[in-house]
Image: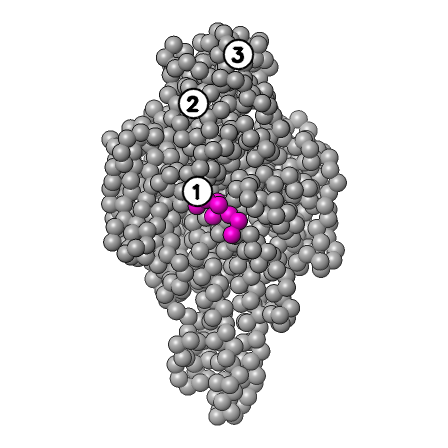
Amino acid sequence: MLRNVPLLVLGTLCGFVTLTPRLESATPTAVLCAQDAASAEKLAAQEVRRYVYLRTGDLLPIVEELEAAPHGGVIAVGKGAVQALGLQPGSLELGSLQPEQYLLKTVQLDGRPVLAVVGGDAFGTLYGSYRLAEHLGVRFYLHGDVVPDQQVSLEWPTLDETRRPLFARRGIQPFHDFPEGPDWWSRDGYKAILGQLPKMGMNFFGLHTYPEGGVGPEPLVWIGPPEELAADGKAKASYPARHFTTDSHPPAWGFVPGKTRDYLFGAAALFDHDNYGADYMRDAHPWNKMLPEQCNALFDRMGEFLSDVFTYARCLGIKTCLGTETPLTIPTAVKQRLQAAGKNPADPAVVQALYEGMFQRIATVHPLDYYWLWTPEGWTWEAVKQEQIDATMADFRACLAAAKKVSGPFTLATCGWVLGPPQNPALFDEFLPKDMPMSCINRTVGNTPVEPGFAQITGRPKWAIPWLEDDPGMTIPQLWAGRMRKDAADALKYGCTGLLGIHWRTRILGPNVSALAKAAWDQSGWSAAQNQALAGPPTKKPAGAGGGTSRFMPAADFYADWARTEFGPEAAEPIAALFTRLDGRLPRPADWVTGPGSIKPDNRPWEQVQKEYALVDELASLRPQIVGPGNLERFDYWLNNFRYLRAIAQVTCCWARFNNARDKVVAEKDPQVQKKLARELALPPRRELVAAFTELHRHLLATVTNPGEMGNVSNWQQQTLPVLLTAPGQELAALLGEELPADALPSTEYSGEPRLFVPEVRTAMGAGETLTLTVIMLGMKPQVAEVRWRPLGTGPFAKTPLAHVARGVYTVTLPAESVKSDFEYYVQATAGDKSLVFPPTAPAMNQTVVVTERPRTMLQGD
């Protein structure tokens, strides 16, 4: 690994104007953190040490007293460390820091340089530690960290930076119901993503619960009266519920139920069992035919799951939120039990009792900071009648009364597809208590700007929720950095106190997530700039189609920094220029046809359509300039996504050609002529379609690195393939009177390059926890597959073999007694002369994990 870049130049590499020339003899030799520091401050100290190690290769000791530090510069983390040095709060302007605010400042202490990382509270200090990592060149996203391949020498610059968030609530609203989203996150997956939020300065995590209907009910929130709960919060009665599994009946969102073993093009290797889904859904199949005790067990598993992950969130300073739609939709089984008991489910007193039961269970089973009530989705496009408004207000009253009666340990809030009824978006502000936050997602899947009605709401918290992606484009890349900036600027202008992002996927949204997170802290330099115009409605036409609205703010500076840190400096400038040009203007060959991210035939000639995808070859031409295995992996991720995007468009053109030929065949009434036409007219475009779909999956499977991207694979296999390949193939075989030839049938074999990845990666865990890794391999059956680990930065690596679960899925567990302190690891698999590693920079730079002092409550802020 190269280590010849002084830290001084990172101001140029990373685009931070706060860096100034380094102090002489400023090389840090230790991290100072007080013995009685809050747990979040101790985590901050560990994180400072970890990122210094990753960027420089030097492992600094963490000391509790200055005397224990070697002579040289010291990084003092937290108020206790600063006070132990004898630095006066006034000299560092600490007195003005409020909770979550922080200061990074280099000072001289008896000729010894000290870099203070200190917050207005412990979580502010934690944010400060991650800001320091950003100054070192690290970038943070929901899917993980990006650490540049080229290490730097340990020379410390002078810093003088105070940061205060622009919004009190900053975070994400991952949406359930599709396999691309949290439906498929495991316990470790939740914790991995929660662990990334404070790195981006975020402090909110909210979830929506669909009621009974076409998709739900979902198991996040149990609905029932208090008498159906045990004293420990476990359900004595409940009802069937589900999150997405591949063989779920009845189907939803256009997906055809299916078993992963039947997936084509080698995709089956990604999954270790047929009815794939979250672990808590494993004993819930078929979900709509579960026995009462199975239903209860599902809600109990879900409650324990939320207790674990929400406790972890609270320890990181993250506020959690759950909720249901209003008026409350009562599950059929609950209604029947109420009616059998002589109660009317429409009686407001009965509804209040249901809310009391729901809130008692939450208070008993898991932590929660907010419970939000979602206005109906239909209010987005339908006229809202007064009786609907009255029913919603009555539901609010029942909910408020229930929360008061049971002393619910959370704050009520509102959310929804709209802020309020279209005729008066701010209506609920006139009725609801002022301590209730009001929020809503942007209309028309994010194409509409932030709701202007926020400006009419005063005296209460109000949270804007832009779309980090839209579900019509669920299967394709979406670049919205400029739109995130515009929405953040509008939210600030309307006086919003929260800025959240709704989404399903993670890694492919990296630029969007980063742009929104940064805009929650700093909008200088671009918020007053002239908006860019979007050429063409983004869900309908590519750029150049005409029309459009002002929805974007400039993002060239954002992509300049993003390209440097993602891919290295060698090709950063042309890559940044390309992505800046593509922001909000990527072609969209997918839309909502049968469900999220589906496609329809394109009758235009491919020779015409392919011109819209010149961006693919433009990016590919820069690949020879990329240096370093991490940079190259990230570059190939985007290149394969763009190639996949182009392949989708080609499939839509091939599909149209096949359909046109098929229609001519079906129109022929003479059986012999029809058979001849089937062979001559329909079979050739069928072959082209299969070949195009093979190419699509070759690129798609090269992009899969996490559960959301595995969900994209299921989307294709269960929503599009049955309509596009399976049924038409069966029809064509019948017309031919024989089986289709091999080249007209989709293969079950993987045709891409061998791959190895870990879909859920944690960077912090509590003492006493075991680390279990899932490892997925495509195109490789290894003779040797193992994880190698050691204490962070020291000693030889220990080895543990991976255990084969099924297909391409392997697992390995590092026992708690083996990883008692911060450590690093990498995974290696070998078959013949081919060797694959995770992370791709290993063994020069490995995956690192900090181990905090206490499990579950180890990260308390105070």
Q: Which residue is drawn at the image coordinates 63% and 64% (left, top)?
A: 611
The residue sitting at 69% across, 33% down in the picture is: 525
Residue most toward the front? 4
Q: Position of residue 193 (x, y in %)?
A: 45, 38
Q: Is residue 180 left or right of residue 747?
A: right
Identify the element where label 2 is drawn.
helix
Identify residue for label 2.
Answer: 45
Residue 767 seen in render: no
Kind of element beneath mark 1: loop
Residue drawn at point x = 57 percent, y = 17 percent:
97
Please give the range of residues in magenta. 624-632
Give the mark nearest the N terminus, 3 or 1. Answer: 3
Seen in the image, is 166 located left or right of residue 648? right
For the residues labelled 2 and 1, the Cα–Cα distance comes to 35 Å
Q: Which mark is residue 108?
A: 3
Looking at numbered disc 2 in the image, what kind of residue is underneath it?
Ala
